[in-house]
Each structure stands twice: as structure tokens, then as C-alpha cells.
Image (tube, grey):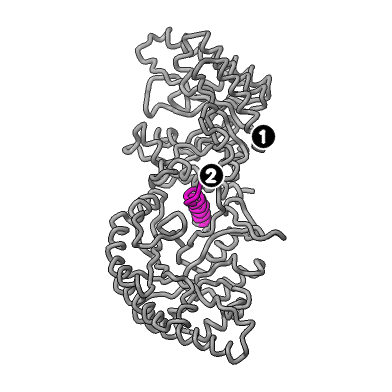
Amino acid sequence: MKVEVVVEIFDEDFIGKIAWLRAQGVARVALDVPLTGGLQPSIDRLETATREVLDAGLQLGGVQPPWSWIDHAIDSEEELAMMKTVIEKGGELGMDCALLSCFRRDLTEMSGAEREAMAEKVRMTYREMCAIAGSHGMKLATHTSFSFFRKGSLLDTIGDWDRFFEAVPDPANGLLFCFGPCDLMGYSVADSIRHFRDRIHAVHALRELPRPERAQPDSWKRHLQIETDGVKLTDMLHLLAEVGFDGPVIPLHVPEFPGPAGMRTAEAWAIAYLHSVFARLG
Amino acid sequence: MKIEIGTTADYWCSILDERLDSRLDWLKAMGISHIGYEIPFTCTDIDRGLQRLPAAIDEAREKGLAVGSVFPQPWKWTNEATEDPTTVDRLEQVIDALGEVGVPRLLLGCSFRQVTAMSEQERDAHALEIYDNYRRISRRAEASGVKLCTHTSLHEGSLLATPEDLTKFLQEVSSPANGLLFCYVCESDFGRIDDDIRFWKDRIFAVHMRNVRRTPEGTRQMHMSEGGDVEVPSVLQTLSDIGFDGPLIPEHYPLLPGDAGSETATASAVGYLQAELDQLDRSN
């Protein structure tokens, strides 16, 4: 396993952030491509950012198209094409994984036929994205949002994911496994790791998980210190190693520490925490 | 074991420092439960420091932070005591104050004076002075329920230059209140760290945590998460094996661009140590 940190390509202090990550011992960087300003400027900037990462002595990890893009792009061939272009460009530039948000549109108002048509469109899109990824030796890692905050979509439960993988069995299709929503759904995180095993292509790591009664959308930024009933990041990382996971672990949802260096201190904390665990895992 | 940290990013800040309140908030947010305070005890500052101490402890407590130790300034108190014998009187005042407010540990530097150029008679007199001063403050510490934690600096050419010198010091001042702030990176031979921890086990009251890489060009401070010449997980395991339950105090961070206050370096040290402690819990 390795620590990977996502950096937005248009970050005003991109080079400074990369240098800072290197000083923290981070070896891999994933690039977030928000598509602000249109496709071509983003692709141009992605190419430049890639060179800057490599020039700094860091490795390329994943490429991250705009978060939640698929929710609205699913209705637009043009927008879907933009997302695929980002993935393809990432593959061409040597990135090994596409970090994707989960399709979470609420479909409860749809008829059965409409819902099935939408599901098939999502599945088709994934088949196409798997083909693109596979041609570049990449994997897709789709976030396990489940349905804690929003119900009535296609991938609300573990059973939904199982059916999704049956429908799109390409080995490039897999998960960006996030402990938080899994626990909030009442699933055992450990059992879920054992269940998905090889389908886990990347991990969003949290040291401690939020309790459901505290979980609000903005609480994602604050739960590093929240005590839990027993799910520990160290245990889950050891379990991931046991099931053979060797991919990127992305420290995310770190709390905002007070003070002028707030987010950086929080990131430094999380990165060092992961390095300690990985050193013991060998 | 618990992580204990100074109230500012550059290790410690005086309880008189105006940044104290924001530092306490920052440390609490990072998950710290125990902190250390720096307190001045020079002739001119000691009264202000001691008057401020109870309120500073209350301010920490209100934020959920316990004050585990106090670090008096100046650090080289044994040198000061040679020049000004009232230094020991003032240190006793600090110890009394700690006993009254329930701070369990006093961190001390010791013996930075070079003895190699001294005659044997001078060296014996220097040793006697240090031991006598320590016997005196140890009696006060015992009465106050305070542990004295003397930094294992092992300065070459000083009275306490080797682990054997430290052992002699602990024998000469055998009070149970007299012990060590064990700084393993000060050992010249990292191969004996684990053995020394076991040998001094009941006299280690606090531990300085860091890592370094020694090269022909000099010693470079490292993030503990980067590794270094010391096997920090092994040190922690040995401390756990001997039942050490005192504070782990990170210090001496690498200097990074844009981190003049060492805030991210401090956070990195705390994150690393928290993971190590979580894993020790897991393996035990």
C-alpha cells in the first residue's frame, strides 16, 4: 500500500503543494481535474501538471475527473465524452487509476422502465470507461457512497454493487472503498473489505469513523478525532493487506485544524499516521 | 503512554506568551490530551511565572488538556546555579508550585559544563555541587509529589557524557523523585538504546521522541515517519515492554519551507506517534 494525495491541477500553489508533499515523504500524487474553463484548457494543464509532478521526483497515481460529474453528465453525450477524455488522457500520461464519484442520482420518481433504462445507461458508460482504462492499463475506482445521505439510486447497498459488478465484470471496474459511508450504512467495514477484496482498487482512509447521529455532510471534514465503537483504521489497513490490497490509500476528510496552517497540519498528521502503519506492514 | 507536547509549534511557549490560547486550541484539535508548559524562573521573571501558573493550568483544563510537565527556563540550570546559588532556591519554589497545582513532572537540563579541561579536584567539586543541588531539589520534589526528569544530553566532555555517568548520577542521587527525560537520539551508540531503556526502566519518567540520520556531513533531523537511524517502533515496543506509562514528547523537527513555526512537522510527529500507539494497542 502507498499513500497517495489528491491535488487539484489548478491549485494556485500546485508546485509548492507538490514540494510540500514530497517533504512529507509522499511518493504518489493523484491529479484532480475539475474541468473549470472547459475541456482543452484542463487537458493542457493536466499535461503540464503531470510534468511538474514527475520533475519533482514524485510518481503519478490516479486521475480524478470532476466529482459528481456522472450524475449530470449521464444525460449528455458531450459531457460524458469529456469525462472519458480526462480518463483517457490520464492513461496516456501514465496514471494508473481513475478516481470516480458514485452515480447517486435519486431515481425514486422514475417508473420501473425509466429506472432500468437509466441503470443500463450507467452500465454502458462504465463498459466504455473500462475499455478506455483497460487499453491504458488503468483501473477505475468508484467511490462507495452507498445511500446514507441520499437514497433511491442504483448503488445504494452492497447487493446493488454486486449486481453492478455482475453487469460490468471487467477487471478494470472496481471501488474507491471509503470506510465512512460503509459504516454509516450499518455494514461491517471489515466484512465489506473481505467481501469486495479484489474489487477494491483504492481506499479513502479515515482514522476514526463518524457516528450516524453526528454525520452531516459537513462533518466529513471533522471526524478524525471522533471516537467510534471499534472500527479502527489500523485494523482495517492490516485487513486490506491480508486480502492482498496493494493500491493507493488516500487520506481524505481530514479535520481542519485551527491556525494559519490548518489543512496542511491536518494532512501532515494523516500522512504520517499512514506511513507508520505501512512501515509496520512492510 | 501518551503523547505530550509543548504549547507552541516551536516546542514550548512560555505561560506568559500571548499565543497560548490559540496554541491550546490547536493542540486539542490535533487530539493531544497532555501538554507541557515553559515557565521562566530567572530572578526577574519567576514571580510572574508562578503567579500565572494556576490560571494557565485552568485554561488548559477548560479545553480538556492536562498539564503533564513544566520546563523551566533557563534550561542550563546547573550552570546558572554555579554562578548564582539562589537558582536552586528558585527551582525549589517552582517545585513547590508544581506540587500545589498538581503538575507531576519537572523537565530539567543538566551538566553542560566541560570538565575535560578541569583538574581532578575541580571536577570532583563540580560533581559534588551538582549532586548536592540535585539531592536538595529531589527532597523537595519528593515532598511535593513531583518527578524530576533530567535530560540525557550526554554532552561530550561533560560530567554526564556517557550512559555510565548517568547511572552513577542516579546512584548518587537515589531519590525516587530523581529520574530521566530519556532522549535516545543523544546516545552515541544507537545499538544500546533498548538495553539502556531496560536498565534504567524505573528511572525513565519521560521520553523525547524524534529521529535523525547521521552522515559524515552532520546529523540531519528526520520526520519520524521517514525513518532514520533509530528504529522508533522498537524503542516504543521496549518502552511498552517495561511498562512505561509516561509522556512521549516529540521535539526537534526537520525544518521545512513554509513551516517556520514547525506546525506541520509537529502534526506529522503526532500523527506518526498516534499510529504507533494505536498499533501497540493492537498488538498487545
Name the outermost residue toward the bottom: B121
Residue A87 picture location, percent across and down: 59, 20
Q: Is residue A152 magenta-colored?
A: no
Q: Is residue A230 above or below residue B245?
A: above
Q: Nearer the viewer, residue A25 or A220?
A: A25
Q: Is residue B282 visible?
A: no
Callout 1 environment at 10 Å: few (<14), some (14 to 19), or many (20+)?
Answer: few
Q: Amino acid at mark 2?
A: Ile
Please report the bounds of the magenta region as a residue range. B258-280
Question: Is residue A252 rendered to the left or right of residue A213?
Answer: right
Badge nearest the viewer, 1 or 2? 1
Question: Which residue has dot 1 on it?
Answer: A55
Q: Is residue B272 magenta-colored?
A: yes
Quadrant including the N terminus of chain A: top right
Query: Majority secondary structure of the magenta segment?
Result: helix
Q: Amino acid at mark 1?
A: Asp
First-in-chain label (1 vs 2): 1
Name the outermost residue toward the right: B216
Q: Nearer the viewer, residue A28 or B152?
A: B152
Judging from the image, what secondary structure is the residue with disc 1 in? helix
Question: Which residue has dot 2 on it?
Answer: A271
Judging from the image, what secondary structure is the residue with disc 2 in? helix
Quarter of the image for residue B12 reads: bottom left
Q: Is residue B157 above or below residue B214?
A: below
Q: Nearer the viewer, residue B14 or A140?
A: B14
